[in-house]
Image: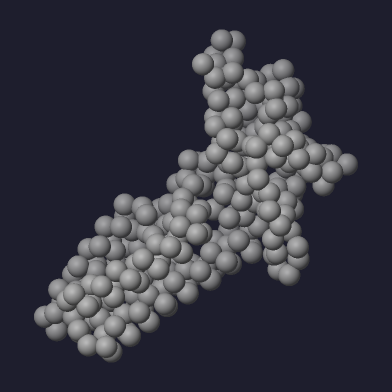
């Protein structure tokens, strides 16, 4: 049975991985704009998620600027799926 | 400064899930397709189907050149569209790439295969008006398939975001060119 994942339990971090699940890769600035957080806050979340193997990042270029592209790994997708399933079970229990 | 409008009570699972889902929907809702993508895609597929049918029916070197030129036009248009999508939105969606380059949806696949078969038969029979009509129908059907996928993606982005990676698509494109050459040589 899927359990809550402490790494993505914090709402802000769950938003990061859930948003990334909509794309294959997102530019750091795009993700920051959608989540409406600061560079430093997003960097901390990405670093923690990357250390766990939930996201991967790579340097790239967009419109002549150096950028960082971030994508969810298969491990991250599976972790998200299980965490959401666990949350839904909790909701069902409360309801 | 952190000004997340979706700050939730982390003890309330419903609120947490809703906030995460809203962030995902906000990203998907903000994505834009390059201007004129569907007409341009329809035209590129029309050219590719028409030239491939001509090439298969014409066993000489000019036929091969025409068919490969059609593939080049299609791949050029597809690559430009995907580059523009990434530049405009700051995201890469492999599901979209699979739809545009592979026509991986049922609508696009049926439209393409049907049009290619009809156009090739018509080319062997030298019914050139029918080649053109089948190619146009294939192009329109293919673009309609991409449009349908886009609507489905906007409704449920996570379910439709996945697709073949750029490397796999490049390999498949090269394989398609080789297949076309083999088809013409065998024919």
Residue at position x 46%, y 50% from top?
A: B163
Residue at position x 23%, y 72% from top?
A: B183
Image x and y of residue B40, in percent:
45, 72
Image x and y of residue B81, in percent:
52, 67
Outermost residue toward the right in this view: B1
Which quadrant would residue A7 be assigned to in this image? top right
Image x and y of residue B184, in percent:
23, 77
Left or right: A58 with respect to B109? Answer: right
Residue at position x 11%, y 80% from top?
A: B125
Left or right: B135 with respect to B156? Answer: left
Q: Nearer the viewer, residue B51 or B145?
A: B51
Measured along the vertical axis of the image, is residue B144 above or below residue B28? below
Which quadrant would residue B5 be assigned to in this image? top right
Q: How many marks?
A: 0
Quarter of the image with the N terminus of chain B in it: top right
Which quadrant would residue A95 be assigned to in this image? top right
Can residue A83 be spotted in the picture?
yes
The figure's colour scheme reads one colour
Residue at position x 18%, y 70% from top?
A: B118
């Amino acid at each position: 049975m899927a359990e809550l994942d402490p790494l993505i339990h914090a709402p802000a971090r769950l938003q990061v991985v859930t948003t990334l699940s909509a794309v294959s890769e997102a530019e750091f600035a795009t993700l920051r704009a959608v989540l409406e957080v600061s560079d430093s806050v997003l960097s901390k979340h990405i670093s923690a998620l990357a250390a766990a193997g939930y996201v991967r990042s790579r340097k790239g270029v967009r419109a002549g600027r150096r950028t960082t592209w971030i994508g969810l790994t298969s491990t991250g997708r599976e972790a998200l799926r299980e965490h959401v399933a666990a949350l839904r079970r909790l909701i069902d229990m409360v309801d | 400064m952190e000004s997340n409008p979706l700050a939730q009570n982390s003890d309330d699972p419903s609120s947490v899930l809703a906030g995460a889902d809203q962030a995902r929907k906000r990203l998907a809702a903000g994505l834009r397709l390059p201007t004129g993508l569907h007409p341009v895609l329809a035209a590129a597929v029309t050219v590719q189907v028409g030239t491939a049918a001509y090439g298969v029916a014409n066993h000489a070197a000019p036929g091969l050149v025409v068919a490969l030129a059609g593939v080049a036009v299609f791949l050029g248009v597809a690559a430009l569209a995907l580059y523009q999508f990434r530049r405009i939105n700051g995201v890469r969606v492999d599901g979209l790439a699979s739809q545009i380059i592979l026509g991986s949806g049922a609508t696009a696949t049926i439209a393409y295969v049907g049009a290619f078969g009809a156009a090739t038969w018509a080319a062997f029979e030298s019914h050139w008006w029918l080649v053109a009509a089948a190619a146009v129908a294939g192009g329109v059907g293919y673009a309609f398939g991409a449009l349908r996928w886009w609507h489905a993606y906007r409704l449920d982005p996570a379910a439709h975001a996945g697709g073949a990676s750029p490397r796999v698509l490049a390999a498949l494109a090269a394989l398609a060119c080789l297949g076309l050459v083999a088809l013409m040589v065998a024919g």
